[in-house]
Image (tube, rainbow, N blue to C red):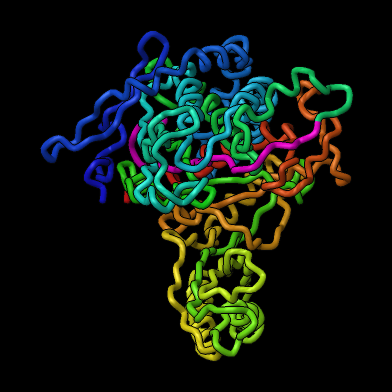
Amino acid sequence: SFSDYHIISSKSLRDRPTLSAAAGRAKHFNFVNRGGNMMAEEKKDDNHHDGWLDDEMKSIQWPIDKSEQIEISLKQAAQSFFASSATETATTTDDDALQSCINNQSVSIEPFLISIRRVLHRYPELMYQERMTSQIVQRILTDMGITNYTVGWAKNIHSKYYNPATGKIVQTTEKGEQNDGGGHGVVVDIGSGQEPCILLRADMDALPIVEETPLPPDQQGSDTAKFHSNHHGKMHACGHDAHMTMLLGATYLIKSLEESNGEFPFPGTIRIIFQPAEEGGAGAKRMREEGVLSNFPTVKYAFGMHVWPTLLSGQVGFRSGAMLAAQDNFTLVLDGVGGHAAFPHLCRDPVVASAAFVMNVQTLVSRGMNPLESGVVSITHIDAGDGAHNVIPAKATIRGTIRALSDDALSQLREGLVHIATKTAEAHGLSLASSEFAKDSYPATMNDDGLFPLASKCAGLVSGSGKHTPVDPTMGAEDFGYLAQGVPAAFFFLGQGGDGNGDAVQSGCGKCCGRVPTNLSLHHPEFNLDEEVLKRGVALFLNLALRSLKELSETGEDEE
């Protein structure tokens, strides 16, 4: 199934074909099979962006000088931090100096972050269709002086299934471009190219939602409207534009640590990944299958985060163990006997059986699960008949979702669901014609217990209170769980719910969102980002990267 996509080897990312700068732009490569050999061929069409990308890049507010003194102080602080031993008394001072520089530098690039986020927000794209988003990310990396990134990640190997609009194969996009089956992920390694290696991840895709985020009355028709979605019916309503921005900001600061000889003060490698298709498309699983964890240098730890409207701005939510649920979707078809509604005794009514199933399946959690565990079964769609008032249909289709806080519990729910559907159908003289589940059910996102001291410390360092905010696990799901299955991992919630009343906290420019509420739910058509969270996410990514590499180097895990 991977015959046309050959980056699934233990080869170093640094040995793979990379992009090079040419006339200020990055070249794009497809990985193709040529007689069994891995080759890269330039993807010429991806650079045909009709000037829109050049125009958008003019709005990016780059720091005035990429070698400002504040960056030099961050470099010096990082050098002292990594030079000190864990047993030295000076470590505390070095630790404090590093954190002070990280906070100062994250704040200093806030206009840069806000401008990036607004560009990304204007171009929301659905799973496996993130071509323009990928071009923006690649262009910003290139303008940072980073040209060794690789593309072509997260190929859509289930194109019949993973179509965000219809569930069928897409022949062309709304712009008439050929559907290329995904592959818009971007990966860059920064550092020595040797172990230890840690991974920082941001997701890229948007949602099929018409944006309705209101503007303050005094900004109606102003420049603020310019960063609303340019793609009608698509919206960054889950904050993935913010996640990419925070990771790009962290990448910029990590790059600033580079010495003139190309070396970095930290040991090992920081792998930075921009991952497509989180919204149901299992993009993290595709990248894991393609080697993003196993390619040399192999990843030791993985870190990710998500903006969270139900936490106040300034809070950083974290817990050990289950953070997000395991999740699967299902489609059941009940097969009966249709006929005239006046003669139900001559029929086998799938509508009545469907209603009975909806009631019966409620016992799956209340009576089928351990009371100390948690689970969700939600029926979200029932389809039967063609709308005629006097016809009993022959079939009914039932759709929904199941969720649990462990992979084992999800498996039990799946088995129990089919059992109840089968027996309910039989009790009404019908049969369960088919039961289908998602191509890729999401595993639970588990925060590694061993990472709790490091991760909770980093969360506290960037939070407004100086400590992490304990949170309960949520029944939302995240494909970051696929990465957490492979290596010890930690996932965080970044509070962006404003001041407790839903009022947005003013960020650096004072114009980002005015008093528009920022505590509306993820996936809401009026979802609004508190852009103050951007600098906090940058600081968290940077702390996680540097402090985890120091920990790994001191414990000798880079020598395994």
Q: Nearer the viewer, residue 214 or 346?
A: 346
Residue 32: image quadrant is top left
What range is drawn magenta here? 190-214
x, y percentage for residue 340? Answer: 59, 79
- Residue at 68% of width from left, 25% of height from top? 227
Asked whether the viewer can see residue 188, the reply is: yes
Residue 58: image quadrant is top right
- 513 in the magenta segment: no
- Residue at 49% of width from left, 60% of height from top? 442
x, y percentage for residue 353? Answer: 59, 82
* Left or right of residue 253: residue 508: right
Q: Please say if 457 is above or below 54.
A: below
Q: Nearer the viewer, residue 223 or 89?
A: 223
Q: Please say if 198 is above or below 358.
A: above
Residue 213: image quadrant is top right
x, y percentage for residue 424? Answer: 55, 86
x, y percentage for residue 240? Answer: 59, 39
- 198 in the magenta segment: yes
Q: Nearer the viewer, residue 164 or 264?
A: 164
- Residue at 69% of width from left, 40% of height from top? 462
Q: Nearer the viewer, residue 535 or 333?
A: 333
How would you classify the magenta stretch by its main secondary structure? loop
Q: How many marks can you see?
A: 0
Asked whether the viewer can see residue 400, the reply is: no
- Residue at 69% of width from left, 28% of height from top? 228
